[in-house]
Structure formats: structure tokens, C-alpha cells
């Protein structure tokens, strides 16, 4: 990671204090290269997956180890998206408590319905001000199976009048939704399908 680097992604299940999980963060360097730093906070080896462009790979880190992965500048890896910090964002949800944990930039915490998924359950985020974005990442983190089987993504400027941006079907822990460039203050994700699994969101991330 070089001076002037910008954070472009992170899906960390660790914290700044030891909690026995994997912590990571990725940066784009001024020369266009990419650096990913991963720390295994557990005493035992941990295996994780990395998505790079259209490809993925798995890597196993020994207990307590730190690894850095780098990629040279490449059109295939040059991100067209910039991370939108959610500093000051607040959240509400129905059902479940601790909706704020979905916007705390810490994937080791989560909001959860605490019950089986049902149409109409929602997580709503107040960004604090109108933000511009064109990608929404809904990350269910390490709670395997706790992703929304179906979703509706809506936005609002006043928290009262809503318009639908996208609908879709969740297929795994990370649901990435690309939308037309949008400016809005409020964002809502609503479950549209039933499932015996809970619905959990470790982090919502926006990109412009």
C-alpha cells in the first residue's frame, strides 16, 4: 500500500481488537495497482475467498498471519466505483433490533430478523444527506444462508415517498445491485420471499 492510496473495498469479519476472525481491506494505489491486506486473528489457519474482477481464488492463512496481495494496473481490475463512506448513517428495521449494526462498517456485527424470512421485512437506512451512488452491496457476512431470497431496493428523499430501483433474487452471502446513477437520502431493502432461514445483514455498502 503506497502513500495516497484509497480504500476501495473491505469485507472484514475481524475487529481492531482480537476476535479470532479474518480482517481485510483493499486499496487502489496512485499508480493504479491494487493492494489487499488480510490478517488472520485466529490461532488456527483460516481459508477465505477473494473476488478479483470476474475471477475468484481461495487462500489459507496460518494462525496469526498477515498477508498482502498485489495486482498491477489493469483495465480489467480498474474499479469504476468509488466507496461511499456511511459516516453518520442511521438505520431502522422490522423486525429485529440493532439495525445500526448493518451500517457500522464492521462485518463482524450484524442486524438480523431473529426469525424466518417473510415478505415485508425491511432494513431502512438514513444516509444523513442525499448521496450519489450506482451500486449497492448487501453483505450477509459469515452467517451462512442468511441472505434475502428475494429483495426490493427502494429509495426516498423524505423517508415517506418511495420509488423502486431494483428487484431481484439473492443467491449467496453477497448481493450486489447495480442501478442507474441515483441521488437519495433514504435507502430501503425489503424482503419479498419467504425462507426458513433468518435474514442477516452484516454491512450495506454504497459505491458511486
Image (cartoon, grey):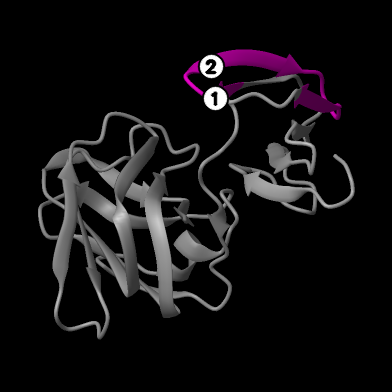
Q: Residue at x 86, y 26 (%)?
A: 65
Q: If you read the primary sequence from the N terminus, does the residue marked by circle 2 or circle 1 appear first?
A: 1
Classify 57 as above or below 4.
above
Locate residue 128, reporting x and y percent.
45, 82
In reply to whether residue 130 is colored magenta, the answer given is no
Q: Nearer the viewer, residue 81 or 148?
A: 81
Q: On the picture, is 172 further left or further right than 120? A: right
Image coordinates for residue 46, horizontal then vertical, percent: 69, 22
| Figure quadrant of the N terminus | top right
Q: Is residue 87 above or below residue 14?
A: below
Category of crowding for the residue at label 1, using alpha-carbon neighbours closer than 10 angstroms: few (below 14), some (14–19), many (at least 20): few
Relative placement, left or right, of 21 versus 121 is right
Q: Which mark is residue 56?
A: 2
At 58% across and 21% down in the image, what residue appears?
49
Q: Is residue 148 left or right of residue 137?
A: left
Residue at disc 2, secondary structure: strand
Residue drawn at 34 percent across, 30 percent down = 172
Say which residue label 1 marks: 51
- Span highlighted in magenta in the image: 49-70
Distance, label 2 to label 1, CA atoms, is 4 Å
Determine the residue positioned at 61% across, 14% down. Answer: 58
**Does residue 52 belong to the magenta stretch?**
yes
Q: Label 1's element?
A: strand
**Label pair 2/1, CB-CB below 8 angstroms:** yes
Residue 151 in view in this figure? no
Image coords of residue 201 (percent x, y): 40, 51
Amino acid at each position: 500500500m503506497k502513500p495516497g492510496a484509497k480504500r476501495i473495498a473491505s469485507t472484514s469479519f475481524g475487529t481492531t481488537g482480537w476476535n479470532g476472525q479474518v480482517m481485510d481491506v483493499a486499496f487502489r494505489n496512485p499508480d493504479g495497482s491494487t493492494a489487499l491486506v488480510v490478517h488472520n486473528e485466529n490461532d488456527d489457519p483460516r481459508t477465505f475467498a477473494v473476488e478479483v474482477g470476474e475471477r475468484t481464488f481461495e487462500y489459507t492463512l496460518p494462525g496469526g498471519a498477515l498477508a498482502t496481495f498485489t495486482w498491477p494496473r489493469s483495465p480489467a481490475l480498474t474499479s469504476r466505483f468509488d466507496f461511499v463512506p456511511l459516516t453518520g448513517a442511521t438505520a431502522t428495521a422490522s423486525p429485529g433490533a440493532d439495525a445500526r449494526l448493518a451500517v457500522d462498517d464492521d462485518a463482524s456485527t450484524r442486524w438480523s430478523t431473529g426469525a424466518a424470512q417473510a415478505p415485508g421485512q425491511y432494513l431502512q437506512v438514513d444516509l444523513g444527506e442525499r448521496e450519489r451512488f450506482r451500486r449497492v452491496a448487501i453483505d450477509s457476512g459469515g452467517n451462512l444462508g442468511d441472505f434475502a431470497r428475494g429483495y426490493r431496493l427502494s429509495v426516498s428523499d423524505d423517508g415517506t415517498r418511495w420509488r423502486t430501483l431494483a428487484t431481484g433474487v439473492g443467491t449467496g452471502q453477497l448481493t450486489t445491485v447495480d442501478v442507474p446513477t441515483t441521488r437519495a437520502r433514504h435507502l430501503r431493502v425489503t424482503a419479498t420471499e419467504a425462507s426458513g432461514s433468518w435474514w442477516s445483514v452484516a454491512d450495506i455498502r454504497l459505491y458511486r
